[in-house]
Image (cartoon, rainbow, N blue to C red):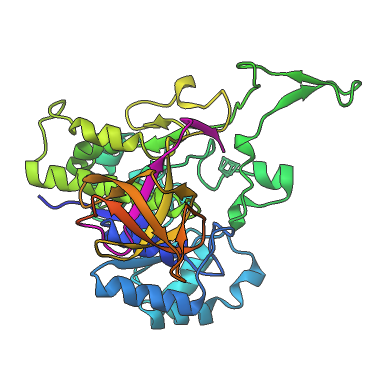
Amino acid sequence: MKLPELLAPAGNLEKLRVAIHYGADAVYLGGKKFSLRAHATNFTAEEIATAVAYAHQRGVKVYTTLNIFAHNDDLDDLPAYLRGLRDAGVDGLIISDPGILTVAREVTPEIPIHLSTQANVTNRESVRFWERQGVRRLNLARELSLAEISAIRQASGAELEVFVHGALCISYSGRCLLSLYLTGRDANQGDCAHPCRYLYRLEEEKRPGQYFPVEEDGRGSYIFSAKDLCLLNRLPELIRAGADSLKIEGRMKSVYYVGAIVRLYRAALDYWGSHGLPAPGGEALPPEFAEELGKIGSRGYTENFFSAPPGAADLLYDGPKLLHDYAPVGIVRAQGPRPVIECRNQFQVGDLLEYLGPGLANSTHRVDAITAENGSRLEKANPNSRLTLTLAPPPENCAPNGLFRKKMDSGTKNG
Ligand code: SF4
């Protein structure tokens, strides 16, 4: 059985290395120009070249986003930028604007073009249209059911990419002006302020400043706020439907989120690769997959349109809650019985840390000593320091770019 590509977000070089460590087959990243997600710490030209070299050494592909809706002025620098991407060796250009597509075909015809989900491809004739424009791969709209994805597969030989995990818009991707209207920040230029997650109240025009709650519960109403997409349990159906690439959303998400989600989907794909696909409605993933999913932050999960159009249960009415029990505490910089980590969250001597090992193998270790770079012993580890850990038992399989996490005292945090 040919498994689909697992495509991960890389908001910066560190996330790229962690995504590759945990099993991404390909990553997507944005440069400083022409890319949505303006607030992700996008890559400079040198960083793109470094990223491509690092990924290619490990057999991983790199796709670059140029998915803004361009205005005339945006086009002036485009040819030079495209030539830079070609020289860096990127494997695909993710585009939504027909103007950018036209210039890309003229300037860098050798780089495959992938159509962004911003182009909202929802039917087989749209696929045929974009194929005629020279598009190699289409990232289908997130608003499709499994039956629609299967029907498009039957009608087209194009590469099909499907989002399987991450944040959702309440609009069709790219068809939302809420942020521009309310904050002046344009989602279609990569600058969304996420006002669909805000708390809304009602004000009567003759009573300025008096707010009438539109209550779903005591905290107010989050009428636009969608839960996160999760198709972890639907991978056999997507493989059978002929998806070529499974995409994880989240260039702005944390390095822990990227690593943990990539690891989970890698393990799930490998599980079905080694066990064979179950009969429809048959075997499910073993319980440790759901357990692991629960250790990664989310705003609650939905399968969106996969089986049926989403309803009230797929929206988050009681606040922009981020559910997470675990905090990342460090990224491994040097392996060994006493690993060196880059600290990301506080922890102290005596705490129990969990290492995210190969597959879904988690190992738990007590912190016996924390040593700073200057050799001094610390009781407490603080973020952004490089530390050597003495752990009991010593970790056996930790490797550079692997992650340690810690269970937090309270299970739910807002954020
Ligand atoms: S405001 Fe919400 S729905 Fe609109 S583009 Fe931003 S994230 Fe998507």
Foreground pick, 133 / 320: 320
Residue 113 inside the magenta-drawn segment: no
Seen in the picture, residue 152 relative to 334 is either above or below; the reply is above
Q: Can you give x and y, in whole percent of width and height, for residue 352 in the image?
A: 35, 43
- Is residue 239 at all visible to an observer of this figure? yes
In the rendered picture of this protein, how many numbered marks are placed on residues?
Answer: 0
Q: Which residues are magenta?
A: 397-415
The reply to whether residue 82 is in sight is no
Q: Residue at x 73, y 42 (%)?
A: 182
The quarter of the picture showing ligand 1: top right
- As displayed, is residue 61 above or below residue 390? below
Percent position (x, y) of residue 112? 34, 69
Query: Extreme front residue here?
Result: 377
Residue 216 lies in quadrant: top right
Relative to residue 285, is residue 402 drawn left or right? right
Q: Quadrant of the C terminus?
A: top right
Look at the image and say whether residue 410 sits in the magenta stretch: yes
Q: Is residue 245 above or below residue 48?
A: above
Residue 190 % position (x, y)? 58, 56
Q: Is residue 62 left or right of residue 411?
A: left
Look at 36% across and 74% down and name the residue there: 52
Toward the viewer: 169 or 159?
169
Q: Front-most of 339 and 256? A: 339
Residue 43 at x, y percent in the picture: 50, 70
Task: Give left or right: position of 332 versus 181.
Answer: left
